Structures are given as C-alpha cells and as structure tokens.
Image (cartoon, helix red, strand yellow):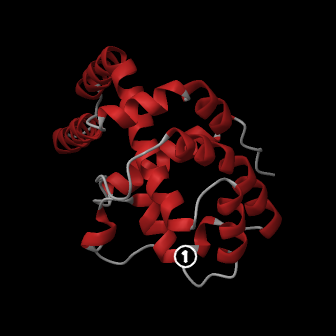
Amino acid sequence: MKRSSRILALLFVMMAAGLTWGEEGPPLTEAAVKGFIASLPDLDALGRELKIEDSWVKAPSGPPDGAMMGSPLAATVAAMQGHAAAGRIREVIRKHGFADIMPWAQAGDRIIRAFIALKVDGQDPEMAAQMKKAIEDIDKSEMPAEQKQAMKDMMLSSRKTMAAYGNAPQGDRDLVEKHMQLLEETLEKAPKKK
C-alpha cells in the first residue's frame, strides 16, 4: 500500500474514532511545513531500522481526552511517551528544526488537515459522482434492505466527515499548497513492505 494510502486510511480510522482537528499549537510556518516534510523519509528509515510496527503505540481506550482530541499526531506522540524509540525519534525531529516531538506533531496535525482539505476541495465533484454511483450500485444489489441502508448511511457519514475536515485555516492551506507537490511526492516514496 502506498504511504499516502496508509496515511489516509489512518486518518479515516482516527476520524471514525472521534479524533478531530483543532488549531492547537503555534501558528503554522513555512519552516515547519518544510521541516515536517523533510522529516518523513528520515522517520520512515528509522522505523525500518528499529523495526517499529504500528502495534508499538497503544491505541487509547475510550474517547480521547480533551487536550489531545484536536490533534491525532499529538495524541499518538503522547501514547508513545516512554517508548525506547522516543529518544531516536526526538533526534530526527530536532534535525529538521523542531524543538521536540510535540511541536512536530502539532505542526504535522495542521499540515495533514490542510493537505486533506486541499485534496477534498480538488476532488469534490469527482467524489460526489463516485458516491452517487456507489449508492446506485448498493440500491441495485441483492443485499437485504437493512444492510443497504447501513452501507449508505456509512458512506454519507464519511462524506459529511470529509466535508467537515475541509475547513482547515486558510493560512495553513496556503502554506501547504506551496509545498503540495513535494508533500505528495514524499508520501508516495514509501518503501514497499516485504
């Protein structure tokens, strides 16, 4: 699976779990966007070196606390505190201009939110057409009516959720849009799992 697909899948899981974005942390800067993007390949390499699996971060049980609810990456960072790899991750983050892991995560939350907002904006008509076609296909299927309705409700809920995430601050969108091509290229360069 491509890294961008993995990231988007993770973001959908976080949205379904009730994690939403706020505007926590300092305002997004050009240096933060560049540093965050530049950190991704190094963090990928570190993850491969240390054989870090998704399972090393424990998923929060129950709803996220108020402080972390607005920051999916920050919530993940909070969950990994005390892990043996935290020091190595901190070294990578600092190399890319961040004082520590939490400011990196807060910037990353804002960058990803703006990235999704820009993607949603660019695909809105296409996504609407795909959703309409999918709903028509569900209606034509031989599924029981209750199952059809559940699938349609889930699809409509996802669409509403994506629309809600389209409200990233304009300043964040403008900064991320300047680096959109580099961000997309970086996200696509994920090594294949063996």
Query: Residue placed at 67% from the left, 53% from the top?
Result: 96
184 w.r.t. 100: above or below: above
114 relative to 80 in the view: left or right: left
Please state the horizontal and vertical placement of residue 65, each as a whole percent of the image: 28, 74
68 w.r.t. 183: above or below: below
Please state the horizontal and vertical placement of residue 192, each as a whole percent of the image: 77, 44
Query: Residue placed at 72% from the left, 37% from the top?
Result: 189
- What SS does tag 1 mark? helix
Q: Nearer the viewer, residue 36 or 151?
A: 36
Q: Nearer the viewer, residue 61 or 96?
A: 96
Q: Quadrant of residue 125?
A: top left
26 relative to 143 in the view: left or right: right
Residue 50 seen by the camera? yes
82 relative to 88 in the view: left or right: left
Please state the horizontal and vertical placement of residue 176, each as a whole percent of the image: 48, 33
Query: Residue placed at 67% from the left, 36% from the top?
Result: 186
186 relative to 159 in the view: left or right: right
Query: Residue placed at 31% from the left, 23% from the top?
Result: 137
Residue 58 seen by the camera? no
Q: Quadrant of residue 145?
A: top left
Residue to which mark 1 is pinned = 80
> Residue farthest to the bottom?
82
Please state the horizontal and vertical placement of residue 108, each as a whole percent of the image: 49, 51
| Labels in figure, total | 1
Amino acid beneath label 1: Met
State which quarter of the image contains the N terminus. Answer: top right
